[in-house]
Each structure stands twice: as C-alpha cells, then as structure tokens.
Amino acid sequence: MAFLLSLLLFFLCNSRSNAQGGPPSPGYYPSSRVQSLGFNQGFRNLWGPQHQSLDQSTLTIWLDRNSGSGFKSLKNYRSGYFGTYMKLQPGYTAGIITSFYLSNNEDYPGNHDEIDIEFLGTTPNKPYTLQTNVYIRGSGDGNIIGREMKFHLWFDPTKDFHNYAILWDPNEIIFFVDDVPIRRYLKKNDVTFPERPMYVYGSIWDASSWATEEGRIKADYQYQPFVGKYSNNFKVAGCAANESPSCRRAPSSSPSGGGGLSRQQIEAMLWVQRNYKVYDYCRDPRRDHTHTPEC
C-alpha cells in the first residue's frame, strides 16, 4: 500500500510540474503574421473618455465609482484576426470585467452577435478566470444563450503583457493565448454561428451581479481605480464589411493555410483544456441543451 501511495504521489506531482511548465509549443504563431496597429489607427474612445489615457506604448482604461471606459474599432468586420496584448490589475478586482471582444450590438440591439474574451475579476491569491463566449442573434428576448468556456491560465496575467486573440472566419472561431489555441468553435449550421459584421471593442466595467463566483462577491470601490492596460500594439487583420467577398486578409489558423489546426496545435489546445479549463457550457447539467444543439 505504501508503495502504491508513493507511486500515485509521484504521478500527481509530475503532472502538476508539467502543467506549471506551460503548454507544449503550438509550432505556429499567427500573431507574427499580422502587422501591428496603433490605437489611433484603428480605434476610438466609445465611452468614459476621462477614464482612458494613451501614451506611446500603452492604452490604459480604468473604472471607479463614477465610470468605466470602453473603445471601439473604426471599422466593422465580417471575418479576421483580432488580437491585443493585455496586462491585468493585481489584488482585489472582484466584480470587474476587463474585456476584448467582437459585437454588433449597436446595429442589432436585442438581437446581436458577439465573440468574447473577458477576464472575470477575482480576490487576492485567487487566479483570474478567462471567459470565452459566443452569442448568436441576441440575448434580448429573455432567453439568454451563452456558450461559455472558462479557463485559468498557466501564468500570472498581472505580471506582464500577454497576447489574447480571436480568429473568426466563415467556418470556425479560435481563441488564442500567446498563440496557443485554447478553444475552437466550429460552424455546424447557420443557427449556431455568427455571420453578420461586428466591430472590435475593449472595456472595463462593473459586472458585480455575475462576474465573480456567480455574483456572490461584488466590486468593492475602496480598491478603486480598477485598471486595464492594453499595449499600443494591436493585431488586426480582417475583411471590413464593405469589402469584396473575395477578401482574404486574416492569417490562416494553422500552418497548412487551409484553416483548422495542426496536430501540434491540437496537442497544445488539449493540454490547456486538460489542465486549465474550469467550465464548459456543453458539460453543464444545469443547462437546457436544446438551445445549444452543437453540444
């Protein structure tokens, strides 16, 4: 029995050690194939201008009792690669969302599409949760249908800037962290896939009703301001809504050039999902999966 316990402890420690070492190399880096775009070249302030500052290297947005802040791309896109380098605030950030996402909510209020990268705020000594989500044709009919997949990360996102990206093409959506694919969402039919043009947004705001431990822990403004930092080095390569249907601007998701993921990328993604995925809407028994047939 002692030998078996020792063997089990060895495998557990070895597994944890491998996980802490970071994912296997994906072997392909789509961000390197996209030219950098300065904030003023591709974006503008959307709200909270007094809570937004830009210097040569960094866009900073913050939230206090008075306001948060958000920004929006100058163009709307029907496909593309959309990435940003972000650094999060350490300490108490419960209830606060720091985000980078695609949406057409302003064009289709109550019936919009959305592809989200959202950091759910936390409390000291607990990790941030990175939530990825996809909405198709609305959440304003009283029947909110999100497709959330949540992750912790293999690094501390408050220590340095890291690249977070969405690749959206007519057949799939892939979420990347430092070029490692963490989630792939396939088009299985028109009903479960966003196809209408969307703008690119970033924001920081108070979502106390749900962001941290399903709303149990709220934002506490004694810790204000809550700050999100974006490198002034955005990665955007997409086809604008008014461009030719033959437009192909985004990098391929894989080295084959034909979409999908290589075996090496899939291995890296599965490593992340085995070690750091903490929620999958398709595996939630509380959900009514008649609304998510892709599951």
Image (cartoon, rainbow, N blue to C red):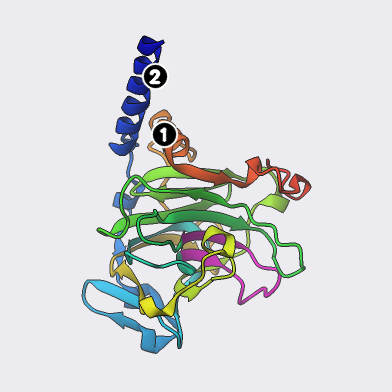
Residue 199 placed where, x, y %?
A: 52, 70
Label 2: which secondary element: helix
Which mark is first along the chain, 2 or 1?
A: 2
User: Which quarter shows the N terminus?
Assistant: top left
Asked whether the viewer can see residue 240, the reply is no
The quadrant holding residue 135 is: bottom right
Would you say residue 226 is visible in this rendering?
Answer: yes
- The stretch in magenta equals 100-119
Instruction: Let me know if residue 118 is in the magenta part.
Output: yes
Residue placed under numbered mark 2 in the picture: 8
Q: In the picture, which quadrant includes the C terminus?
A: top right
The amino acid at mark 1 is Trp
Relative depth, front residue between 212 and 45:
212
Q: Please, what is the three-letter code of the amino acid marked with disc 2?
A: Leu
Whether 287 is drawn above or below 19: the answer is below
Marks 1 and 2, Cα distance to the nearest angstrom?
Answer: 20 Å
Q: Secondary structure at mark 1?
A: helix
Percent from the top left, x then y, of residue 65?
45, 85
Mark 2 closeness class: few <14, some 14–19, many ≥20 residues within 10 Å? few
- Identify residue for label 1: 271
Q: Quick check: 74 above or below 112?
A: below
- Position of residue 128 in the picture relative to residue 34 (left or right): right
Residue 136: numbered disc: none
Q: Is residue 140 magenta?
A: no
Which corner quadrant of the image does residue 271 belong to? Answer: top left
In the image shown, does 88 or 84 lie closer to the viewer?
Answer: 88
